[in-house]
Image: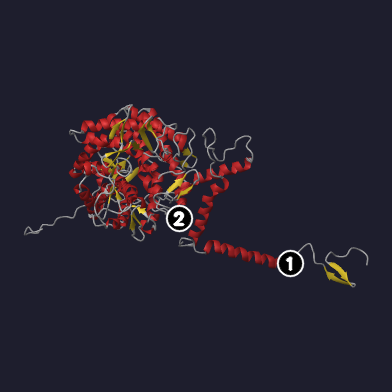
Amino acid sequence: MTGILPSYQRFVNGVPVPSISRRSFRLREKYLIISVLLTFGIVWLGALFYLPEFKSSTSVNDSVYNVYKRIQKAGPELLMPPPLAQNEVGDFPVVGIARHGEEGDDPHVVEDRNRLKAKIDEDMGMKVLERPQFDVAPSGSSSRGPSKPPVDAIEEPALGNNAANKNVSPPALKVDSAVQKYVIPAMDPGTDIDVRRKRDTVKEMMRHAWNNYKLYAWGKNELKPMSKRAHLTSVFGGGDLGATIVDGMDTLYLMGMKDEFREGRDWIAEHFHINEIDSDLSVFETTIRFVGGLLSCYALTGDTLFRDKAAEVADALLPAFETPTGIPYALINPSNKINRQYHWAGANSILSEVGTLHMEFTYLSEVTGNEIYKEKVDRIRDVLHNIQKPDGLYPNYINPRTGMWGQRHTSLGALGDSFYEYLLKAWLVTNNEDEQARAMFDEAMQPALEKMLRTSPTGLSYLAEVKYGRVYEEKMDHLSCFAGGMFALASTTLQNTLSERYMDVAKKLTHTCHEAYDRADTKLSPEAFRFSGAAEARAMKSNEKMYLLRPETFESYFILWRLTKDQKYRDWGWQAVQALEKHCRVEGGYTGLVNVYHSTPVGDDVQQSFFLAETLKYLYLLFSDDDLLPLDEWVFNTEAHPFPIKDKNPLYRAAAKPAVVVHEDNRL
């Protein structure tokens, strides 16, 4: 046979047989392969879109949307790796910006990274309005359930881009029909341009902190700004409580960040459910951040959602108060109602924690008409008022079962601080009605100042810690730096024999706290500073050298500026802003520092919720006019959430009292 045989044939004993190898499949085989691949694809897509989520999903659209959101969140990590450690000159590298000569910098990849980040920023709705024009209502009804929308309720349109941040469409904002406008006061046109610039700088810091939390940790409690993910080991654990959202809401409102405020409000309405949390929560921290933050938003806006959510949180905490003395346990699990104490405190509760519930619970009773909350904290007050105080001092530990003091350790810093603060502020917020609180404050301050106020060899005043009536440590916590503002308020709100001394102490303590900032390489204060030997206003131990984005010194700057108008307090505040921007700002937000005495410090990779609630709020107010939250109308809780003063501020919003019916025979 001549010619070329077909490629599929060969001969065996002269008989042609098919070849094993060939260049193409038969048509029927092609159809079979395609059918298998299509079947596999359909099964895979079905598993992806239709199988149940780890958390229940109500519709196919929810599943599809969740997949989209995961891809969106994963995008930055896939194309934009997390920031590297600081280099030798202390600069954090900016991800996505090509540097000439670096290996592996494919310009196309860099361009893709930048394009992706720009798209995400656009989708996240970065718009900020200068001045909010919220409609607010006076006192709402005392009903505990969700309020029925009034006939002429004002309905705000859903936010287009902001809706992409939630698994549901954002609900419309509704407020009561009997409205009054609450407008954030604009800065006086005559205000120095430099002051305006500084205030706007702080506002931009808030925007940076909020947007990065929104981008990388939305709904979680806090952000890890260097790792660009949620911080799951915070005081509130890994649950979806949105601590940063609730804590930062009133700061957003005061800064005029209207869109951000509304997206936070929408998340709270749809996703904040404390009773679903199955982990231990601090009764104290949950009260000051969540109950306090929600009540502040209710006062500012009149939106009853905030009032009702505050009551929901307080109700979840009430089982912790079921003790023989009424003094609550430190921790509670909202899901199973189990209480316990901190392991390190033994059987004791902490003075600063049990004594720092009064403002929130009393005001909650006022706005809901439910007296149970006030009754709980009044009972704590009675125990602390009647118990014998060793040397007139309040120890930091108390047993909730026996009502007896624990170890005789006294401090105006950690473990004791805000108890004294609330004695003064409970009196202030009631427009001086709570006379017992002011009397207890003045009585406590005399032995405290006598035994704890010390002066260093170079003339720096500080508050030492006392144990069994004697100075225990010659150190002062950064937490104690709130005391400058506290003593200044005490001095100017009641003229008595202690007024002059209170103001003197206020100025001296605030000066010392400033020195702790100024003597650090970063110009940011350590967690604690000592006054022994050659060390003055400096930390000595490694665990004291941290800066955790704390606000206490700035709180004192703000209050003393308002009361004295001494320019140095604004100057000191601006120095702090510059230090925060230089050392704490990273691409993903703001981080605390491990050691403030390093010129190129390492970050601790935590953006605390109180950085938004307190630190930035006090710095913003420091550079604002006095008619933005005037001190004769507002009192700040220990988390910097403003509460209106009774009978002085029309936004107090007390619930309507039941009408007293008098019958014709004069019987009630």
Q: What element carries label 1?
A: helix
Mark 2, Cα crowd under 10 Å, few <14 / some 14-19 / many 20+, is some
Q: Residue furthest right?
A: 2
Of marks 1 and 2, the one in the foreground: 2
Front position in the image: 150 or 458: 458
Q: Is mark 2 on a helix, strand or loop?
A: loop
Q: Position of residue 505 (x, y in %)?
A: 27, 32
Badge 1: few (under 14), some or many (20 or more) residues near its Cα, within 10 Å? Answer: few
**Colour scheme shown:** secondary structure
Marks 1/2: CA–CA distance = 47 Å
Looking at the picture, does residue 3 appear above or below residue 602?
A: below
Residue 480, located in which quarter of the rendered image?
top left
The x, y position of residue 288, in whole percent, is 32, 47
Number of disc labels: 2
Callout 1, which amino acid?
Leu
Q: Position of residue 394 (x, y in %)?
A: 25, 44
The residue nearer to you, when weighing 22 against 398, is 398
Q: Can residue 433 be seen in this view?
A: no
- Quadrant (top left, top right, bottom left, bottom right) of the C terminus: bottom left
Q: Are marks 1 and 2 in contact (CB under 8 Å)?
A: no
Measured along the vertical axis of the image, is residue 456 above or below residue 126?
above
Residue 513 at x, y percent in the picture: 35, 33
Front-most of 598 and 276?
598
Numbered circle sitting on residue 61: none
Q: Which amino acid does label 2 sit on?
A: Asn
Q: In which quarter of the image is residue 461?
A: top left
Q: In which quarter of the image is the N terminus?
A: bottom right
The residue wearing badge 1 is 27
> Of label 1 and label 2, which has the lower sequence position?
1
Residue 259 falls left or right of residue 507 = right
> According to the image, label 2 marks what residue?
167
